[in-house]
Image (cartoon, rainbow, N blue to C red):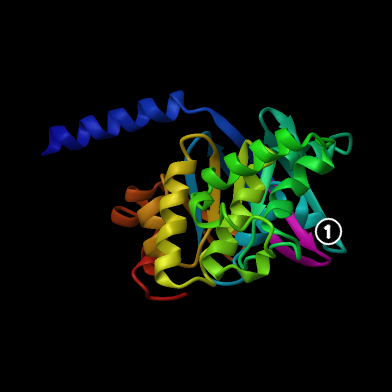
């Protein structure tokens, strides 16, 4: 048994050394006015993995997620220090083009938010913004994106219908397809299943497992069972600090920090 554990540890160490970083956050601090919301966060995110961020409400999970595409800057009075490197470039550099970042980093929100347009136009919106007008190319993008989000067979005969006529679970997969349409590198998900029923949640979780073959995924979730099921690595945040970050099974089975253990065993949060 001990040899098995040692072999596993050696394999993990090898994986750590060989893994490619998509993001590398260094000494990140963020304030909303005078409120210190993120405190000295150091956090690598790796390619083609699902990274889960867990922690109680108000701990900084969603704030951190929104720094990764700089959407947090839409909130007045936000200011930051430290660096966030995406593929080796500091996205907090004043000269960094945030528009370029958002074409590479897609976002899926807590509640499905389809546009009040047809299913087709929801998917074609992003490519059109980026200058694609050819109907044949748009048709291909729409089909490939809906297939990628595992919803093509459910909607292929109703593409001209308003997206608001879809179920909640279908709407969320449509929003994932919309993110895929711009061919991102990373997909950020902020509690994407919290408004869904168990059956729809399962479909989205299965989809996430498929998507990680081609994309890096970062998911904020209140559902610890979900984090344990679908993520490769898990970060536990508390009061704006990153308390612990490791492979998911190590976080849930062998947490190194007592606060992590207290949270995942339900003693608080």
Measuring from the top left, give residue 206's x and y in whole percent.
Answer: 41, 52
Instruction: Give the residue number, with chain letter if any, for mark 1.
Output: 74
Left-right relation of 190 to 89:
left
Measuring from the top left, give residue 177's x and y in whole percent.
Answer: 61, 49
**Front-most of residues 205 and 120:** 120
Instruction: Tell me if residue 243 comes above or below residue 266 in the rendering.
Output: above
Residue sitting at x 36%, y 25%: 14
The N terminus sits in image quarter:
top left
Residue sitting at x 59%, y 66%: 59
**Front-most of residues 238 and 157:** 157
Magenta stretch prevailing secondary structure: strand
**Front-most of residues 24 and 42:** 24
Callout count: 1
The residue positioned farthest toward the left in the image shown: 1
**Front-most of residues 29 and 224:** 224
- The answer to whether any part of residue 50 appears in the image is yes
Measuring from the top left, give residue 135's x and y in whole percent.
Answer: 76, 38
84 inside magenta stretch: no
- The answer to whether any part of residue 29 appears in the image is no
The residue positioned farthest toward the front in the image shown: 157
Left-right relation of 74 to 185:
right
- Which picture quadrant has residue 32? bottom right
Task: Give the extent of the magenta segment.
Answer: 28-39
Residue sitting at x 43%, y 58%: 203
**Label 1 crowding class (10 Å Cα cut-off): few <14, some 14-19, many 20+?**
few
29 inside magenta stretch: yes
Left-right relation of 199 to 162:
left
Residue sitting at x 68%, y 34%: 86
Measuring from the top left, give residue 194's x and y in whole percent.
Answer: 52, 70
Instruction: Classify mark 1: helix, strand or loop.
Output: helix
């Amino acid at each position: 048994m001990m040899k098995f554990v040692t072999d596993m540890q050696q394999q993990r160490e090898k994986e750590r050394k060989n893994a490619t970083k998509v993001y590398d956050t260094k000494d990140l601090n963020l304030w909303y006015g005078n409120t210190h919301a993120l405190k000295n966060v150091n956090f690598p995110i790796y390619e083609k993995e699902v990274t889960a961020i867990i922690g109680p409400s108000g701990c900084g999970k969603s704030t951190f997620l929104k720094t990764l595409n700089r959407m947090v800057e839409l909130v007045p009075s936000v200011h930051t220090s430290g660096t966030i490197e995406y593929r080796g470039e500091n996205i907090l550099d004043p000269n960094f083009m945030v528009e370029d970042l958002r074409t590479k980093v897609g976002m899926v929100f807590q509640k499905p938010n389809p546009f009040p347009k047809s299913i087709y136009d929801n998917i074609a919106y992003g490519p059109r913004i980026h200058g694609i007008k050819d109907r044949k190319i748009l048709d291909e993008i729409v089909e490939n994106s809906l297939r990628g989000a595992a919803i093509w067979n459910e909607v292929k005969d109703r593409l001209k219908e308003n997206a608001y006529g879809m179920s909640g679970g279908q709407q969320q997969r449509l929003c994932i397809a919309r993110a895929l349409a711009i061919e991102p590198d990373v997909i950020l998900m902020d509690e994407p299943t919290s408004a869904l029923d168990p059956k729809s949640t399962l479909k989205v979780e299965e989809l996430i497992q498929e998507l990680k073959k081609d994309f890096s995924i970062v998911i904020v979730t209140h559902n610890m069972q979900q984090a344990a099921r679908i993520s490769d690595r898990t970060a536990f945040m508390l009061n704006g600090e990153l308390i612990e970050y490791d492979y998911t099974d190590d976080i849930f089975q062998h947490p190194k920090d007592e606060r992590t253990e207290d949270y995942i065993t339900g003693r608080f949060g």
